[in-house]
Image: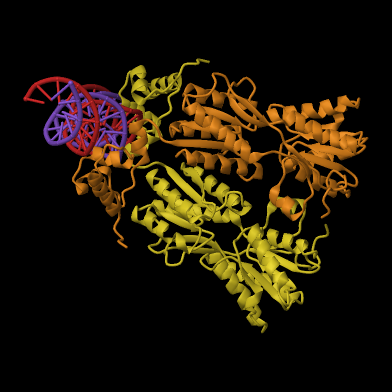
Chain colours: A orange, B yellow, C red, D purple
Amino acid sequence: MTTERSNATIKDVAKLAGVSPMTVSRVINGSIRVSPDTQRRVEVAISDLGYIPSRLARGLSARKTGTLAVIVPDVSNPFFTLIVRAAEEVARRSTYRVILCDTRADLSVERDVVEELIAHRVEGIAIAPVSDRSKPHLARLARFGVPFVLIDRTVDGVDADAVVGDSTGGARLLVEHLIGLGHKRIGLIVEGDEVSTARERRKGYEVALKAVDLSLDPTLVEVQAPDPDGGFLGMSRLLAGDEPPSAVFAVNNLVALGAIEAVRGAGLEVPDDVALVCFDDIELASRLYPFLTAMEQPAETFGTLGTQLLLERIDGRGPAHGHVVVLPGRLTIRRSCGARPVVAL
Amino acid sequence: MTTERSNATIKDVAKLAGVSPMTVSRVINGSIRVSPDTQRRVEVAISDLGYIPSRLARGLSARKTGTLAVIVPDVSNPFFTLIVRAAEEVARRSTYRVILCDTRADLSVERDVVEELIAHRVEGIAIAPVSDRSKPHLARLARFGVPFVLIDRTVDGVDADAVVGDSTGGARLLVEHLIGLGHKRIGLIVEGDEVSTARERRKGYEVALKAVDLSLDPTLVEVQAPDPDGGFLGMSRLLAGDEPPSAVFAVNNLVALGAIEAVRGAGLEVPDDVALVCFDDIELASRLYPFLTAMEQPAETFGTLGTQLLLERIDGRGPAHGHVVVLPGRLTIRRSCGARPVVAL
DNA sequence: CGGTGTTGTGGTACCGATAACACGTTTTTC
DNA sequence: GAAAAACGTGTTATCGGTACCACAACACCG
């Protein structure tokens, strides 16, 4: 193994192989118009020099980088991790590379990330936007002609391809399940309605209640950050009310976690004192302790389908207007709702 | 808001501002040698055109990209997520961007990722390598003069900066804890010893047993993949043995998860029938259900320190030989080991 | 046998930025 | 008050590739 420092360029390879840089370029890019003999010589030279073509130069010159990006608000959320994995897989099969970006649900980080990706001249972006306030960022992409696909969330006033879950329907099912268990006072912990999923889940909650003539008590709705802290706060406030709910619907898995902590913190238990349901599973946690009754969404499909739509857009195929795919979820009944689990532990 | 498609270059900006591209470049890069008036005119032009400089061109021309990379074997593992977050934070403060890469613990993916990052001309890499067999990949980096820092794991035969946990000491503490609880037959589920942490944790296990004259029974050691499936398999085999262990040390959090499932699958319970300890916590799961007795490692510090070492390397500072930092873990006693928890639930 | 393709290869310009140097002007310095 | 230094800006070459066109050599056609 040589220890020599290598930073060969296409010219070095060309010289060593006794051809022009253009011919080396042809070999790299798998052009057909190269004689077998030349091709072999060039390949040997590349290998001898340990040559790796610069993506910077390639991208600059060819005006395409072969790079996509996936932007999510939280890479550590298992729901988004699955999306990312699936997206990478699809992209890889189309010989695209993927840059993964985490906005931490922070609008200003999202703004920077989008700008950075434009600067990198990525060819397309799959994005789970922070909220409706992401609209300027998406407008920026549109202005630069960067195709994008929305994942998990739509953005008010933005017409684009999107792959989302059936939040309204899913929420309705969850709440109907609680109603079926006899609950009449059902609380909701949800994030602000500038996030499409929150908006729709809230709507599903309301539809389910109205359908059985249960009144909508505004004191039973807590608007909180979509994380464990928000869940904790929301549940704490609900429990402190005059007439606390007997069941609560948490807008997502992390909120549910915090809500459970709040229940326990109040010396109560889930589901005995408060039943709980939510959107999205926490896979690792459920393996250890199958507890959360949840509307599970097909995260991988979000990633797969989203990336496929994106690739179509890049190729100039696809309809003129945004193509929105809505995927149904699956209700998984476990302990937190208080129903007898279907499968014994 | 104009809907015009924008792809302005530095020349367009220069023309609009009535200066040369060089002057625009100076403004972009915050050079001091620009008159306030010119600066303002250029900034207005940039803003009017919605100009975003091409990183490709900048990188090619300036021969530096201002980009680092973090490579981990599993972004969804909370341990690595924390590392990544911390690394990004440090990099951002030094005006570096970060590319996040997930190898899925697959050597061939790691090879491709490394090659891709060299092609992107990243200026430095923090990597949690797959195993000792990652050595050629690291050699490649060295050959290209790309500084790198090892995170969480060292690689046999590679001299580099590294930030790792005290695996041997941590493992010893965990096993001593089990011994202190009266266990005499203690099993181990570990991955192959081409991974430094596995090697060292196994060593810690052996040291702890020897220290109290407990024999090393090879049938109590299961070598398995470092994921839930491996844990399940390992635990299943241990339980099926002639003289099953009364306690088991799982090499990491995910293995522990699978191990618990195996115990339950056999109609037994943790810790009543088998006590269990492991490395690394699962934060979300522990919030829902504080169960795992674990050696928690300061993941953020791995990321922070690692990136700092990397930045020093890039600046040409830092010692000639690899600087290895070993960080101690913290033993968190919960239920899975069978000890009475310090804090009531 | 000239005309028309096809094949394999090279030359040149250029992608969009910056480094390095040059140059006219103003300011400082003694 | 002239030389030296600082200032503000432009010119040119170049980073490492690829697009586009040119072109020689050979094949095939009627």
Where residue B179 sits, quadrant-wise, is bottom right
Q: Foreground residue, A77 or B146?
A: A77
How many tags in the picture?
0
Does the image show residue A238? no
Q: Residue furthest bottom?
A: B213
- Give the side of residue A202 with respect to residue A102, left or right: right
Measuring from the top left, give residue B150's x and y in whole percent.
48, 58
Measuring from the top left, give residue A153's x and y in whole percent.
65, 30
The residue located at (80%, 60%) in the rendering is B343
Note whether B311 is above or below A169 in the view shown: below
- Give the side of residue A99 with respect to residue A200, left or right: left
Measuring from the top left, give residue B60's x and y in whole percent.
33, 38
Does the image show residue B20? yes
- Give the side of residue B258 with respect to residue B10, left or right: right
Q: Foreground residue, A334 or B283?
A: A334
Q: Foreground residue, A307 or A210?
A: A307
Where residue A209 sits, quadrant-wise, is top right
The residue located at (78%, 66%) in the rendering is B271
Note whether B155 is above or below B99 in the view shown: below
Quadrant holding the C terminus of chain B: bottom right
Measuring from the top left, give residue B157's x and y in whole percent.
42, 67
